Image: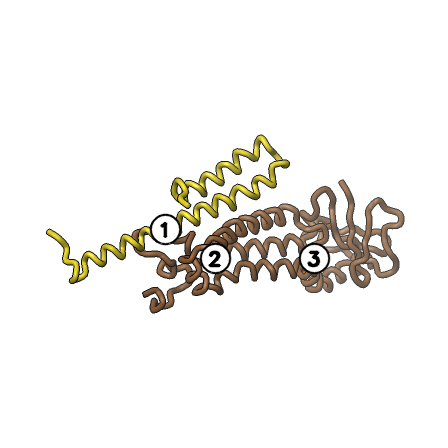
Chain colours: A brown, B yellow
Amino acid sequence: MFGKAQEQPLDSPMTRYAGPGVRPLTRVLIGPPGLPLISVTTLAGLLLLYGASAPGGYFMTSIFGGLLAMGVAMVWAPRLLVGLVRADGRPGLRRHWARWVAIPLLGTVTAVLLTFDTSYAVRFALSEKSMEAIARELVAGGKTSADPGWAGLFQVSSVERQGGAVTFVLEDTGFLARYGLTWSPDRKPGVDSDASYRHFTGPWYEWMERF
Amino acid sequence: MTLPGRPVDWIVGGVVLTLVLIYPLGGIGWPLYLFIMPLAMTAATVLAYQEAARARAAGLSARREQSPSHPPQE
């Protein structure tokens, strides 16, 4: 009877492997991951990627994304384990394997993107031209509109000029330090400052100053 | 294996125990926090399967009683 059931939309109660007269929570626990769990997993992944999309990262966003991801794992893994162990759980796992796989797949994609700093690289690549234009304008003696405001896709709290170098201090990044990006086409910046610099790409350096 | 309570009791119990233990144990209790909720979820899921199995069995016997070979008694 279950094998001939019509395909139902994602998260429909009819797709749950249970008979009538069963409580809603029971249906959820023995059913495959539904739209809410998959949505929360996606949200956790997006928060983690956003949290790592700037030098120093966004601390609170990363913490919240990490807690959400941990919550998803705590809901998903025990349900899968019990479904695998029980004979009446395995047919449901086979039937809805795609939904069961969706959660670890999203987790793996997020982990790979985080490992290679993809969100940071993409955000910087999309912002580089705007930031360089602002930096050149400031070095040439012009005024900038990015103080405070946006430089490309980065929200900046201030733009500071030191000789031929320009530092974009990024809003809300880091935990016990301020982070930013420095454009310095002529030389490595910071030989005469307390801040530390790390080469990022081309004329760009990651800037960090402890509180 | 028969577990006491309902699935919702285990889930609510796990959440409450985690939150209650955060205060006395603080940061050093994090390995414990990581174990409480998975254990509570596992117990809740086992209970949910048992409840569904009972509901299926009850539904099956009710249908048997209503079938022509087993007419309902008056």
Q: Which mark is residue A24?
A: 1
Q: Of the residues under marks 1 and 2, which one precedes in the sequence?
A: 1
Residue at 38% in and 43% down = B6
> Badge 3, how many Cα within 10 Å: few under 14, some, many 20+?
many
Provide the secondary structure element on which disc 1 rests. Answer: helix
Tags 2 and 3 in contact by the CB under 8 Å rule? no
Horizontal relation, residue A208 to residue A103: left or right: right
Q: Is residue B73 left or right of residue A2?
A: left
Query: Label 2 crowding class (10 Å Cα cut-off): few <14, some 14-19, many 20+?
Result: some
Observer-nearest of A167 and A121 = A121
Residue A169 position within the rendered picture, expressed as x and y whole percent measured from the top left: 74, 50
Circle 3 SS class: strand
Chain holding disc 3: A
In front of the other: A118 or A158: A118
Q: Quadrant of the C terminus of chain A?
A: top right
Q: Nearer the viewer, residue A146 or A170?
A: A170
Residue A164 position in % (x across, y down): 85, 56
Give amino acid for label 3.
Answer: Ala
Furthest residue toward left = B74
Nearest to N terminus: mark 2 or mark 3 = 2
Query: Which-is-in-front pick, marks 1 and 2?
Result: 2
The residues tagged by marks 2 and 3 sit, at their Cα atoms, a distance apart of 51 Å
Q: Are marks 3 and 1 on the same chain?
A: yes
Please indicate whether residue B48 sits to the left or right of residue B24 in the image: left
What residue would you read off at disc 2?
A84
Three-letter amino acid code at the position of disc 1: Pro
Helix, strand or loop under label 2: helix
